[in-house]
Structures are given as structure tokens and as C-alpha cells.
Amino acid sequence: MPPELEGLRRLPGHEKFVLVIAYFVVIRQWLLRQPLYRRIMLGAALYLLVALTAYAVFGSNACAVVIDGRVVAVAADEKSARGTLGELIELKSAQAGIPVVAGEKVAYRGVRAEPGERLEGEALKEKLSQTVAFKARAAVIMINGEPKVFLKQVEDAEKVLDWLKALYPVQDGDQLEFKEKVEIGTAYAAVESILDLETAKKMVLWGSNKAQQYTVKEGDTLWDIARAIKYDMDQIILKNPGLDPDNLNVGQVLDLSREAPLITVVATRQVTVEEEIPYPVEVKNDDSLLPGERLVIRKGEPGERIVTYRIVRENGLETGREILEQKVLREASAEVVARSPVSIVAARGGSIRLNWPASGGVASPFGMRWGRMHEGVDIGAGYGSAVEAAAGGIVASAGWEGGYGNTVEINHGGGIVTRYAHLSSIKVRSGQRVDRGELIGLVGATGNTTGPHLHFEVLISGQPRDPLDYLP
């Protein structure tokens, strides 16, 4: 471009326009003074000159790539811009294994640009790769109407759901379904959000895991920590290999991260079994016995019944058991026990006298069991029978507690807490004051358990103690 025109091109737009108009007016006045034949010949030549000058001043010499009204790159021309974007789409498609498209509306517009502003080759490809969102039509697992997991093929999504249903133990007669509304569809998704089969399985099983840590402070016990964050102690131990639950060190960092599955597998079955009816226990005071001593006067005899249950398990853990029908074959006979009326002294100087929380004998005592510490007693109470507060206090928590299932914890003051686990139903709420003998729930088999019973714990200053030391 001649230096004069180059200088004119760099002027602001409105000045360019004024100069070109003035130039046109001067030429027109000069032509009007010429003879007619010369006006025709010179006019055509000068018109072409003006058009070429205007194009040189106002015309484009580059191509802008525009996405949603925003210029993201400037190429030498439209052909190179389109070609580079096409190469990128082919590359992304090969990497993803499925056809890929540009996610936004891409337009091309002629612009004026300095040579240094125009991108070519790898520089243009890198710029477009960073600014263009590439998408592909993928299979999507919808959970309660929300797109959660994207995969390449519908067949992959079906494999993930089939794998999830087969993940948990299945028993004869189980009917499997998902608790959430789960659907498979197709939708356009960002290429980076489309998962391979194994990653999608982990996503469905663990969901979005947020890391959480806790630093042990003076006076902390694992039980206190688990109760504060409503986390099962066994899960904390599993997440922290080598952890000694009885000897926490101040400054010790615990991994409290927890994952929740995106989809819940519900297994429902109906089963008829012949089972024992737990015998009730009648307690009589005997002044001749030592504090804490118990003497069985007449041994109880369990009854027998045929019962049909409807059992519901979620992700392998029992969450509900309903009695559909039962027939009593033999009634249970009560056990009569004598005990000392004198209470055992607690760790903080007070006395503890607890009532039996449920009617039935001890099916599994406190102590080592199956290579692990059993931190309470299992009372063989019948499914749906009453669970009562062992003493008056404030309900510290009431709800689902991992392997414990439906659980109630009562704070009786003085560092004394009682725990009632595997309940089929909870009849109190957190923060509620309860009296000794008040109904707090019903016996069940929720959580990690082999059958209906009440798991009962006594904790003093956070440490588990044998409940039989405090029961009549």
C-alpha cells in the first residue's frame, strides 16, 4: 500500500470518511468544468480509483473468529480459520472416540488487522483450542431429573447401572430397583465431562467426595468425634489404617472424608422364617446379694413363632423390616432374676442405676467377638417390641448411624451416655427430654446385623463399659 494510503488508513474512522467525501467533491467539481465526452471517460476512471481507494482504506485484510459475539482469534483469512477449526474438531473427535462439534455458534467476519495481530498455523490452532468449547452427543444418566454422569454410548450407561445392581449381595427373592428416579438419555456435553466406563462406575458409587480432616484436641475421644460429625466409628477406623481408637494423640490428623453414592440400590424381598420369641426378664431385689450381683432364680424359655417379613435393604444394609404375618407356636416363659438393690458407683462419683431397655435375655455379651471388640450387649428382643430409656436424660441424637442403623443416644449427665441401635422405628427426636422407662423406639434389624435384636451400649466419659455392670 502506498505510504499516503497507509497513513490515511490509520486515521480514526470519522476522519477517513470526511477526507474521502471531500476528495470526491473536489473531483466532481473539476469534472463539471470539462467537456461532456471527457467527463464520461474521466468519470469512469476516477470512480474506479475512488472505489479502490475506499477499499484500501476501509476494507478488511484479515478474518476474525467470533463466538457468541466475542472475537476470540484473528486469522489471515476465512479459509485458514475454517480449516484450522476443522482440524481441531477432527483431532478432538479422534481423542474422544465420538464425533465432536464446536459447542458455541462460530461466525467469521472480515476485519482490518496489523500483520502481528494475525495468527497462523500452530498459534491459531492453540488459540482456538483454548477458546472454543468442544461438545459431543453423549449418553447421560439422569438422576431425579438432573444430568449427572455422561458416557460415550447408551450401552455404557446401561453397563454402569447393571454393574451397580450386581455390586451388593443378592438373596433369593430379591426385587431390585433404584430409590432415585434413574433414566438414560442423550445430550450434548463438554468433551472433558464424558467419562470412560471405570471412571463412571466410581462416580456413581462414590459421588462427589469432599476431603475433610480433623485434628485431635486435648480430651477428644473417637466416640465424641464420631457423634459430633454424625459418622460411624467403624468407618473412621477403616479410613485411617493403623488408628488405635483407644489412644488418640493430640495433633493427630484424622481423615473424615466420606462419600455418598449417587444412586441407591433397593432390594426388597418377602421371607417366611421360624424363629424364637425372646423371653421377658422379671427382676426382684435381694438385699443379701453384693452390689452389682445378679442371680437367676428361674431360667427363661424362649417361645417359637412362624413369621413372614417384608425386608428392605439399601446398598446392602437393612433399612426396614415389616411383619406381614405371624403364627405363635409356643409362648415364651419369663426369666426371674434376683439382684442387689445397691447401685454401682460411676467414674465421676455418682451412682448409675439403669433399667433394662428391652424385654429379653442377652444374646451376645460385652467383650471380644469375632476378633473385634463388641462394645455393648445384644438383647434378644422380638422385632417391633418396645425399647425404653434406661434412665432419664436428653436425647443427644436420633437417626441413621451407618452400621448401627436407626440409633438413639441419650445423655444422662455426669459423662454417662446410653446407645440403642438397630431400631426399626425411632419414637423420639434429638434434644427431647425423656424419662426413665419412656418409649424411645422399636426393636429392629436396621444397619449391619444378621437379625432383629437391640444393641445396647453404656459409655462413661466416652469409654464403653459393660452394660451388665449397671443393669439390675
Image: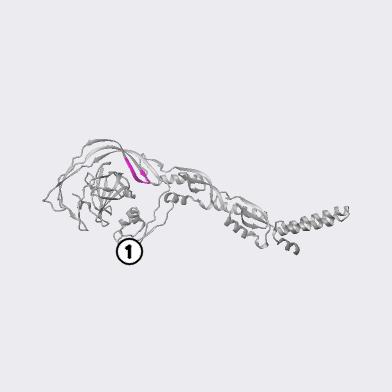
Is residue 200 in view? yes
| Residue shown at 81% from the left, 57% from the top | 27
| Residue shown at 52% from the left, 53% from the top | 192
Q: Quadrant of residue 244?
A: bottom left
| Residue shown at 49% from the left, 44% from the top | 155
Question: Seen in the image, is 456 located left or right of residue 203?
Answer: left
**Which residue is more in the foreground, 161 or 178?**
178
Is residue 49 in view? no
Q: Main secondary structure of the magenta part?
A: strand
> In the rendered view of the protein, which quadrant contains the N terminus?
bottom right
Question: Seen in the image, is 203 located left or right of residue 215?
Answer: right
**Which residue is more in the foreground, 397 or 333?**
397
Expressed as whole percent of the image width and height from the top left, the position of residue 403 reads 33, 49
Check disc 1 and report the residue beneath it: 250
Q: Quadrant of residue 120?
A: bottom right
Residue 189 in the image: above or below residue 248: above
Question: Seen in the image, is 98 located left or right of residue 424?
Answer: right
Q: The magenta stretch spans which residues?
A: 313-321
Expressed as whole percent of the image width and height from the top left, the position of residue 118 reads 65, 60
Expressed as whole percent of the image width and height from the top left, the position of residue 197 reads 48, 49
Expressed as whole percent of the image width and height from the top left, the position of residue 68 reads 60, 51
For label 1, the SS is loop
Q: Quadrant of residue 251?
A: bottom left
Q: Amino acid at mark 1?
A: Val
Is 319 part of what is drawn in magenta? yes
